[in-house]
Image: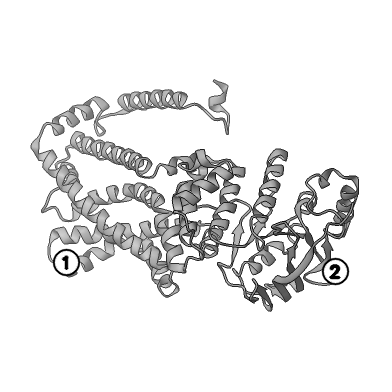
Amino acid sequence: MQELFSPLKVISKRTFFILAFVEGVLALLIWQLTAGELIPTPAQVATAIVGILGTDYFYSNLVQSLALIAEGMGISIAIALLVAYLSLIPVFKPVAEFVIKCRYLTLTGLIFFFTLITSNGHNLKLSLLVFGIVPFFVTSLLSVIDSINVQEYEMCRTLRMNSWRALLEVVIIGRFDLVLEVIRQNFAIAWIMITAVEGISMSEGGLGTMLIKSNKFINVENSFAILMIVFLFGILFDYLLGVIRGWLFPYTKLQLLS
Amino acid sequence: MTPRQYQKKEALLKVSNVSLRYDCLVLRDISFEIDDIVRDGVTQGQIVSLIGRSGIGKTCLFRILAGLIKPTTGTVLIDHDQHPVRAGDVGVVYQNYILFNHRTIYDNLRISLERSQTPPKASIEAVIKEYAAEFSLTEHLKKYPQQLSGGQRQRVSIIQQVLNGNRFVLLDEPFSGLDAIMVDKVKQLLVKISNMHEDNTFVIVSHNIDHSLAISDTAFIIAKEDGKEGAVVKESLNLIDMGFAWDPDVIRQQEFINFCASIKDKI
């Protein structure tokens, strides 16, 4: 018991899950007891979730959000990988550095600009999503590339590989498992952003639109329920991407263990 | 101890007036030569030690010898035709045994063999299996590098460079981080591979004097001269003439132990 309150102690997986369960129950209890008129209780939220899951309206919006995020992630990953890989060619390095700095550009000021240059609501949402995600993707990918030991490139040279082959072997093929990890980590940003951009253009629907509408009609139970659904889907995707990574790249687990 | 009969023929590697400067002078006027050692009735490779303290500039010299960085001044000529060294002429086995972690051991060896300047007559699979059997790696061919011990990874690294057709292989601190039994095995491995071809030349960069010298025929002591910037070759040692070379039990001989102790005072 004392170990649970001592720093740097390693606990078993079983102990961790018991801890997580107990703390989860405690959090729900505190929520239940402190919820007042403004904040719905867990029981009310659970009821709302069941209600939402029983409607076709929810599934059409969920599919809409999933389709948008798949499209946005696909485009963002393609752009980010291109920028990150090209950053190893000196002439493209400044471009990659600029893209990284774009993390500090606020989207609010750019909505008007993107509204002007896009032809419809879908493209507007997609543009905002891609513009919002790519700098974070590139930042993570470049940190993966920066962490590569220079001796790996040197080994390629001793094996008579030219610099293009070394790039392919060490960075592109050799670190593809880490690209999936970067996707997993940054998926959270995309998942958060999607509700925001769907709130900007509501014509196609989506979970973000559902949230805005619930807020507009002060349907707090529904708002909390949608938030919980978004949260749970996020965790599910995070888990699935982790599983896919381990399945596609079995050596990943070994690297984590060693 | 009686020195054995041998002849030194042409230079296989010649370092002339190599200096390296970064913020300060790291290496100064390094010159030495590694010659082809010939013995009657024996395929005799070369094992050379570069001995020096940690941080003296051994790794910089190592990278210059491998053609991975250019020296500020001086030249490194290699092979029978004495051409300037290029990356790819010399194999490198790093201290942390770098391998392609996303490839199995078989694929690590295959990629090396496919890029060899002298493609094997037998099939790639046959050659890999032969080497794997020879060096006790057969059961590990399907594994990933992270599943192997340090000693096993080092063996793969060495064989990878040999399969690539490199007659010259540099080893950075090959004995560090290994237990006593593994050190003996690595020494046996290096002697075995060096004697597989007349031109095979291992250059061991190490601060572990006893083990390096125990398998070397030649050694160069890298150290700084009093009051001067940059490391130089302070002394070259012909271990064959001293009677210490090619003797598997030399490390247990008192004369050799005393000799190593005297070297420690010089670095």
Q: Please indicate whether residue A70 sits to the left or right of residue B246 in the image.
A: left
Q: Position of residue B212 (x, y in %)?
A: 76, 53
Residue closer to the observer: A128 or B115: B115
Q: Distance between the residues labelled 2 and 1?
A: 71 Å
Q: Which amino acid does label 2 sit on?
A: Glu
Dots 2, 1 in contact, CB < 8 A:
no
- Quadrant for the C terminus of chain B in the image: bottom right
Residue closer to the observer: B243 or B184: B243
The residue wearing badge 1 is A118
Residue closer to the observer: B98 or B168: B168
Q: Position of residue A171 (x, y in %)?
A: 43, 59
* Chain under disc 1: A
Name the secondary structure under disc 1: loop
The residue wearing badge 2 is B225
Q: Which amino acid does label 1 sit on?
A: Thr
Residue at (35%, 44%) from the top-left corner?
A248
Q: Where is residue A97 in the image (x, y as percent from the top left)?
A: 42, 67
User: Relative to B73, does residue A220 appear above or below in the rendering?
Assistant: above
Name the secondary structure under disc 2: loop
Q: Please indicate whether residue A24 sits to the left or right of residue A1 in the image.
A: left
User: Relative to B246, does residue A240 appear above or below in the rendering?
Assistant: above
* Chain under disc 2: B
Residue at (56%, 69%) from the top-left corner?
B87
Q: Position of residue B190 (x, y in %)?
A: 67, 51
Look at the image and tell me whether residue B90 can be seen.
yes
Residue closer to the observer: A100 or B41: B41
* Mark 1, other Cα within 10 Å: few <14 / some 14–19 / many ≥20: some
Its colouring scheme is one colour
View extreme (front): residue: B41
- Image label count: 2
For discs 2 and 1, the disc positioned in front in the rendered view = 2
Residue A28: quadrant of the picture: top left
